Image (cartoon, grey):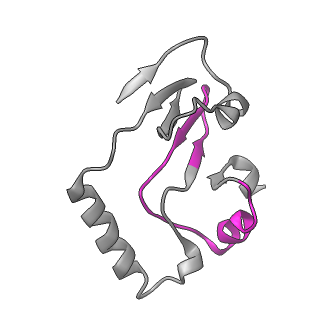
Amino acid sequence: MTAITGKGLTLEEYFKYDDGTDSQYELVAGELVAMPPESPKNVQISLFLLINFLKFVPVNRLSNKVEIVVAGFRATTRIPDLVVLTDELATALEGATRSTITLDNFS
């Protein structure tokens, strides 16, 4: 992971950020961190979990690469490989322009 340092971004600035590449970033304490490509083993594990979760969880409650805003002092996001959503979060993300879970989703 490579951090792109600077003055520190707010969540709003991060949401608007576009460097013209297909690079994926997480925001960690206000700094952009470039995410490396997934390893083949990690992809296999994620697919295995997805296939098996589908036996028990409706497809609309599973999401890969949903972004989660982490509460704290400095702006931070995480992009897990697979998330099992509550019914409320699945509904909140329907029709959204960005697959991002924020604290607003819980109010």
Q: Residue furthest front?
A: 20
Bounds of the magenta span?
68-97
Nearest the eye: 74 or 41: 41
Relative to 2, residue 46 above or below: below
Residue at the image position 58 percent from the left and 24 percent from the top: 30
Q: Is residue 107 left or right of residue 28?
A: right
Relative to 72, residue 96 above or below: below
Q: How many marks?
A: 0
Residue 99 covered by magenta stretch: no
Split into 4 quadrants, where in the image is the C terminus? bottom right
Q: Residue furthest bottom?
A: 55
Residue 51 percent across, percent down from the top left:
36, 79
Residue at the image position 70 percent from the left and 28 percent from the top: 13
Relative to 11, residue 95 above or below: below
Split into 4 quadrants, where in the image is the N terminus? top left
Residue at the image position 57 percent from the left and 68 percent from the top: 85
Relative to 30, residue 38 above or below: below
Residue 66 percent across, percent down from the top left:
55, 56
Residue 87 percent across, percent down from the top left:
65, 75
